[in-house]
Amino acid sequence: MHEMSLCEGVRSVIEEAAVKNGFTGVKTVRLEIGKFAGVEKPALEFAFDVVMRGSVAEGAALVMIDLPGRAMCYDCLKEVSIENRLDCCPDCGGGKLMPVGGDEMRIKDLEVL
Amino acid sequence: MTQERLIEIETDILAKNDRYADANRAVISGLGAFAINLVSSPGSGKTTLLCKTIEMLGDQPLAVIEGDQQTANDAERIRATGAKAVQVNTGKGCHLDGHMVGHAMEHLSLEKNAMLFIENVGNLVCPAGFDLGEDCKVAVISVTEGEDKPLKYPDMFTVSEIALLNKVDLAPYCDVDLDLYEANLRRVNPGIEILRISARTGEGMQAWVAWLRDRLAAKPGAGV
Ligand SMILES: Nc1nc2c(ncn2[C@@H]2O[C@H](COP(=O)(O)OP(=O)(O)OP(=O)(O)O)[C@@H](O)[C@H]2O)c(=O)[nH]1
Ligand SMILES: [Mg+2]
Ligand SMILES: [Zn+2]
Ligand SMILES: [Zn+2]
Ligand SMILES: [Zn+2]
């Protein structure tokens, strides 16, 4: 999987922020991860520790916040919340759902020193 | 003494990739070109499909970027048709990204109103998440892979505009239900277009080539 490349993305965003905001250490990194983003959390945690070595975020704690899965129902034309990617529409029971949210992979904020 | 503070970032993890992809997209649009990102599992027939497509497109200007972990085999197969091709080897990487494609484009001198075909690494998982600057993703899936693949790997089909159901010439030899295959594709992407094709026999290929020509013609700046 590509958890390594995701963490490299996190590292480069943090390094840009460090230059812009003038911090030299990061205590906590908070990510928002959608339910359908396909991110393997233990793999991401592992990759995070490895990739942050030698950066301002070396040794930082990683916090992952789950975001719900949302989809547009092509039958009742409503936006609904779903638990699993292949769930039917909780409102009308329809099976034609197009995800509209839940694939987020965002860096929310940093606690810095 | 150190002081802690909170810094709001609110940035996509793949923001850097997206910047490379946007730069590629600007180059492609500036030329009135049309780019597709071909995604699939290994061996679904992407290179065979491209060779056949190139042959059918005749004198349409085009170029190909081939992504594989190793070997230059696929770019060589494309060059044998007379088309321009660049091979990108991703090494340990399991997908192409915007940066790699940007560098590959530097070697292609893409013409005005050209079609750019990017064959991604055979992998039904992460290429879904990496924008390369293409106009759209095209999923190639073959009848021999099994009807349940769209349900098992939904993301790839959710982000694709069209699915090419390839190797239909083999359908009589497999216990495959093509209608169920299509229903499963629509289950994960109700808006997806589907074409049944055989890159080997040419069945359905006219419709695919017509789709490509329509999409190129619809690009602003094309036809100038
Ligand atoms: N019968 C049949 N075989 C096909 C068809 N399309 C491709 N093949 C065969 O499928 C095999 C794989 O084809 P490729 O074109 O190399 O597939 P690919 O998706 O480019 O493979 P990778 O780049 O390695 O992921 C080859 O043996 C092709 O001849 C088809 O429509 N019908
Ligand atoms: Mg190939
Ligand atoms: Zn509904
Ligand atoms: Zn990958
Ligand atoms: Zn570079």
Image: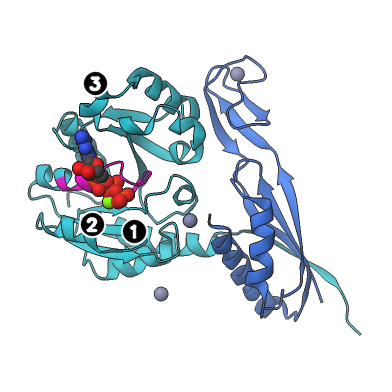
Quadrant of the rendered image holding ligand 3: top right
| Residues tagged by mark 3 and mark 2 found on one chain of the structure | yes
Q: Quadrant of residue B211?
A: top left
The answer to whether mark 1 and mark 2 are in CB contact below 8 A is yes
Return the residue at label 3: B172
Chain identifier of the blue chain: A
Return the residue at label 1: B68
Q: Is residue B36 visible?
A: no
Dot 3, crowdedness within 10 Å: few (<14), some or many (≥20)?
Answer: few
Return the residue at label 2: B74
Quarter of the picture holding the N terminus of chain B? bottom right
Q: Position of residue B24 (x, y in %)?
A: 37, 62
Q: Which residues are magenta?
A: B32-51
Q: Position of residue B112 (x, y in %)?
A: 19, 58
Q: Earlier in the sequence, mark 3 or mark 1?
A: 1
Chain letter for mark 1: B
Q: Is mark 2 within 8 Å of ligand 2?
A: yes
Query: Amino acid type of disc 1?
Result: Asp
Rendered residue at 31%/30% (across/down): B143
